[in-house]
Image: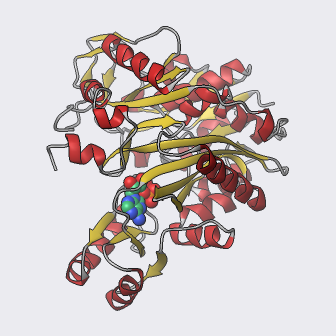
Amino acid sequence: MFDKVLIANRGEIALRIHRACREMGIRTVAVHSTADANAMHVRLADESVCIGPPAPRESYLNIPAILSAAAITGADAIHPGLGFLAENAEFAQIVGEHDLVFIGPSPEHIRLMGDKVAAKRAAKELGIPVVPGGDAVNDIVHARQEADRVGYPILVKAAAGGGGRGMRVARDQGELETMFPIAQAEAQTFFGNGALYLERFLAKPRHIEVQILGDGQGSVVHLGERDCSLQRKHQKLVEETPSPGLNLTERRRICDLAASTMRKLGYKSAGTLEFLYENGQFFFIEMNTRLQVEHPISEMVTGIDVVREQIRIAAGAALGYRQEDIAFAGHAIECRINAEHPDTFAPSPGTIQRYHAPGGMGVRVDSALYRGYTVPPHYDSLIAKLIVHGSSRNECLMRLRRSLEEFVVSGIETTIPLHQKIMTADAFLNGDYDIGWFERTFDHTL
Ligand code: ADP
């Protein structure tokens, strides 16, 4: 096992990884920008190294600085967390070339899934149904032909896209012609790659994803599905497992399909296959070759620590258990709490005046906040994840409501009041929501 792991990330996820390491008797190295000198992940780590100024490009994305920090501190392995360098195949490769272990999948698998057009092609070849469309389109003539073949309304997506950005709906040919060059330019600016593809736009699907763990030695298991249909601007706000929209047969079908596909691929580490689900059909949209923000809900129902498993697997251990050994118990829901105004979604960085996290049975808070901490304006606005487990969905919902009541964060605006509204909305209580429900119901900014 590793002696020392460098955590190439910040915020709650850096803390989450630190916790897993400490429980395994592994020492940790935090890296941080100058804006994060007082962050909790830095305070709790055994050692810390400042790797640059606040701008991510100069710190959390600065590969030479991170490798130097690993060399100086004598780390054996690097955990990339999520976002930043987590899906950068070049980084994974360079880490390996420096005699360090990258805690994640092989650079080849990261590369394959990072290019969405290649990922869809691979999924199709492996026998997974994909959304109609998905081939790269280079110019408007080609785009028009592809759109006619797939049918309107059509979604224009960036091949190198991510984080729900760079997607536009065209309802007819006129709209496609107007937006195509804009989308191309935007993809170039944001993702450094102007390649686009088109996909059938599904009207009211659910977002269903399957958590996978593979040891690269022939064993792959799934930890069930997560329903992440509660979204704003294609970004997840609330996730739950099991999905209230699937029956047992559908759940088994998609989870087994995801696991068997990853077995064929020889996948190593944690990963998530994302699908859209509509009218009894699943369509693959992408795979994340990394830890995801919402991984804790799967941990709550299975008792399996996903980060611990990533570390064990990276150190060469076999899974050591089979699918039949994994028991699924109860229901779990996660609320993503952001430093944003609950009505306008305007970012709200600033200093935390008062902080009180909820507790009690079945309640977990993953957060790097503390009283007096200043949320910097430079990074993602996620400040806390409230994760609640109950023996049934109803118990989980009641526990979530009382936990939200207990949660105090003052000095900045947060989305806690918004989650309180969601948790009393009939459609949510009935489990009757799709990816557009939140925007149709609550978002008055659109
Ligand atoms: P990203 O990598 O940017 O997160 P994804 O392909 O994973 O992009 O899609 C993110 C979200 O966008 C999905 O959860 C869903 O809400 C929406 N979406 C993606 N593809 C489609 C589609 N073909 N039809 C309707 N909505 C879609």
Q: Is residue 383 left or right of residue 387?
A: left
Q: Is residue 332 left or right of residue 71?
A: left
Q: Is residue 310 left or right of residue 161?
A: right
Q: Is residue 54 left or right of residue 413?
A: right
Residue nearer the viewer, 445 or 422: 422
How many numbered marks does the figure carry?
Answer: 0
Q: Is residue 123 above or below residue 312?
A: below
Q: Is residue 213 above or below residue 396?
A: below
**In the figure, residue 93 lies in which quadrant?**
bottom right
Residue nearer the viewer, 213 or 27: 213
Residue 29 showing in the rendered view: no
Residue at the spot 68% in from the left edge and 29% down from the top edge = 304
Indicate how the structure is coloured in the image.
secondary structure
**In the figure, residue 139 lies in which quadrant?**
bottom left
Residue 431: image x %, image y %? 40, 38
Residue at the spot 29% in from the left edge and 46% down from the top edge = 437
Q: Is residue 64 above or below residue 426?
A: below
Residue 407: image x %, image y %? 34, 14
Residue 291: image x %, image y %? 58, 41
Residue at the spot 36% in from the left edge and 49% down from the top edge = 434
Q: Quadrant of ligand 1?
A: bottom left
Q: Where is the N terminus found, in terms of image quarters?
A: top right
Q: Is residue 309 above or below residue 276?
A: above
Residue 150: image x %, image y %? 41, 80
Residue 354 showing in the rendered view: yes
Residue at the spot 45% in from the left edge and 42% down from the top edge = 59
